[in-house]
Image (cartoon, rainbow, N blue to C red):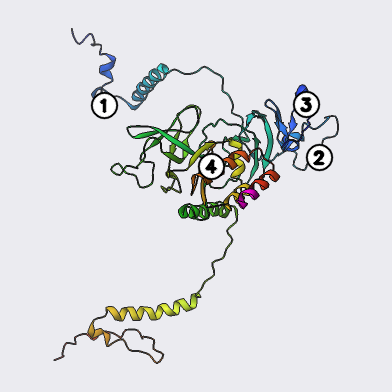
Amino acid sequence: MAEAVPFGAESLAGGRARAARRVLDQVVLPGEELLLPEQEDVEGPGGAGERPLRLNAGARSRLRVVCGPGLRRCGDRLLVTKCGRLRHKDPGSGSSGGVYWVDSQQKRYVPVKGDHVIGIVTAKSGDIFKVDVGGSEPASLSYLAFEGATKRNRPNVQVGDLIYGQFVVANKDMEPEMVCIDSCGRANGMGVIGHDGLLFKVTLGLIRKLLAPDCEIIQEVGKLYPLEIVFGMNGRIWVKAKTIQQTLILANILEACEHMTADQRKQIFARLAES
Amino acid sequence: MAAERKTKLSKNLLRMKFMQRGLDSETKKQLEEEEKKIISEEHWYLDLPELKEKESVIIEEQSFLLCEDLLYGRMSFRGFNPEVEKLMLQMNAKSKAEEEDEDEVVELDVSDEEMARRYETLVGTIGKKFAKKRDRANYEEDENGDIKPVKAKKMFLKPQD
């Protein structure tokens, strides 16, 4: 992460857009325009050279490209809105052209539909709970949005409880709404998180790194002692172990592993395994 | 005097149902069109040129779920919370199963022919259970032990004089 990634200053000053394909895994800055693979053939380098011959010159295959977080659509091009590294994922099947996004780092969470988050209940008003999720507004959670909840059978939720739920409505115009139930009506692990344990905050990028399928940190942590962790996409992690000391050690490891190299991490785990 | 001058009826009166029964269909249509015109002129509209929406190839999504395959957010290790461990297996297996193509051919334990044979005899055995005492005598057993089909019932024969 500490390597210097050089990029041509003239491309920014001259305003010439770069091809997205060539900038993968490099740092991009807000304001840059990126060309999709279809357009870069036409606006090729130099322009004065011969156009490459294409068999189906008339019909251009239009693949649907998804632009993810950190990118916006600007005509036919992608406009970068956050600084970070550009990533791309090929689609396994289907006609879509893949997903482009910017891997950026931030601490402030913006509610997004479908995200699983940890919230703290701040108020009970009538039929809804107000849940603080770290965004600009508290989200609303209806008391019927729990598994097996009816008008007579209310869920046992108090002010100050921790809730693991997902957003059903989250845009810049409306107050976010969350539920603790999935589309089939099952809880799937969502709902009130048990007593004890410790809730702490980390950056959003660390959460995504820890939730990656091949994350070594989680595998190593799981070998230490019995524990339970809940990750919220809003940067909140809840941990619980058998004793308070173990819980605190776990919290410190997870907070610190963002800035440690793999060697330092292995040293620390070795030391812990001994004691 | 009254016959010289035709009394002028108001528009509202003419629009009433009983006055329109005598009219032709053409005049009716004209009246309807005039009504529609009045109503549509009252509506407000924007006086802008028609903008053609360009067919966009790019879709904007703000969620990281599409970009990266993330694991399920609740985790438990070394048996701390057995329910969560069960959930972990379920949710992570679900996401993997969606990726892989399901090309499995279900292997049959019992072949179709054998199934048909068993079913044939099964009908007889179950039928025996529900047959009345008199009819049970009709269920004879074959050499192999399979049940033969039921014979015809003996009906009352009227004596012929």
Residue at the image position 54 percent from the left and 70 percent from the top: B107
Is circle 2 on the same chain as circle 4?
A: yes
Whole-Å distance between the Cαs marked 3 and 2? 27 Å
- Is A202 on the left-hand or right-hand side of A153? right
Residue B104 placed where, x, y %? 57, 63
Q: CA distance from mark 3 to mark 1?
A: 79 Å
Quarter location, residue B124: bottom left
Quarter the N terminus of chain A occupies: top right
Does residue A215 appear in the picture of this structure? no
Left or right: where does residue A206 sit relative to residue B26? right
Nearer the camera: disc 3 or disc 2 = 3
| Amino acid, disc 2 | Leu
Q: Which of the numbered marks, if any, corresponds to residue A53?
A: 2
Point out residue A239 in the picture as x, y percentages from the top left corner: 51, 44
Chief secondary structure of the magenta span? helix
Count of residue discs:
4
The residue beneath circle 4 is A248
Secondary structure at numbered mark 4: helix
Q: Which residue is mark 3?
A: A11
Compared to residue A208, the image places residue B77 above or below, namely below
How far apart in space, not on screen, are marks 2 and 1 (Cα)? 74 Å
Mark 4 falls within which chain?
Answer: A
Q: Nearer the viewer, residue A268 or A172?
A: A268
> Tag 2, which chain?
A
Q: Chain of mark 3?
A: A
A48 lies left or right of B74: right
Against B126, is B69 above or below? above
Looking at the picture, does residue A170 appear above or below residue A223?
Answer: above
| Residue extending furthest toward the front | A275
Q: Earlier in the sequence, mark 3 or mark 4?
A: 3
